[in-house]
Image (spheres, helix red, strand yellow):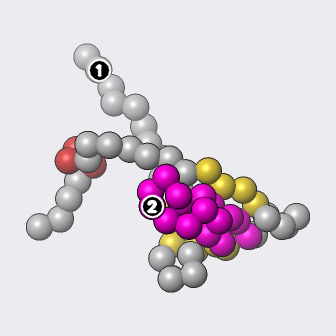
Amino acid sequence: MGSSISKMSAFWSLRGKFTDPTKTKVAVDFSPKGGPADLAGAYAEGKLTWPDGNSWRKVELHPRKRG
């Protein structure tokens, strides 16, 4: 049960933009993943929130140390 980053085999990226001068509304193109080309979301308190209630927080990824 569950998953981990080590099990992930592919990463993907999406393009988006702020749609208002206060940078609290966004539009993101999910068409590369089979979704809408202009999904509206809200940005506040360090997270993006989508119309279905899901939210994404920024995650800092640190490069693996070798040696």
Q: Which of the 4 image quadrants contains residue 37?
A: bottom right
Instruction: Name the secondary structure under disc 1.
Output: loop
User: What is the quadrant of the N terminus in the image?
Assistant: bottom left
Q: Amino acid at mark 2?
A: Gly
Residue 45 in view, yes or no: no
Mark closer to the chain start, 1 or 2: 2
Residue at horizontal 72%, vertical 56%? 17
Q: Is residue 22 above or below residue 9?
A: below
Q: Left of 64 or right of it: where is 23?
A: right
> From this viewpoint, which residue is outermost toward the top?
67
Q: Which residue is mark 2?
A: 34
In the rendered structure, which segment of residues is drawn in magenta? 25-40
Residue at horizontal 75%, vertical 69%? 24
**Front position in the image: 8 or 40:** 40
Residue at horizontal 26%, vertical 43%? 9
User: What is the quadrant of the C terminus in the image?
Assistant: top left
Q: Position of residue 33 (x, y in %)?
A: 44, 57
Residue 64 in view, yes or no: yes
Residue at horizontal 83%, vertical 67%? 20
| Tag nearer the camera, 1 or 2 | 2
Residue 21 magenta-highlighted: no
Q: Is disc 1 surrounded by few (<14), some (14 to 19) or many (20+) residues within 10 Å?
A: few
Q: Amino acid at mark 1?
A: Arg
Q: Position of residue 18 (x, y in %)?
A: 76, 60
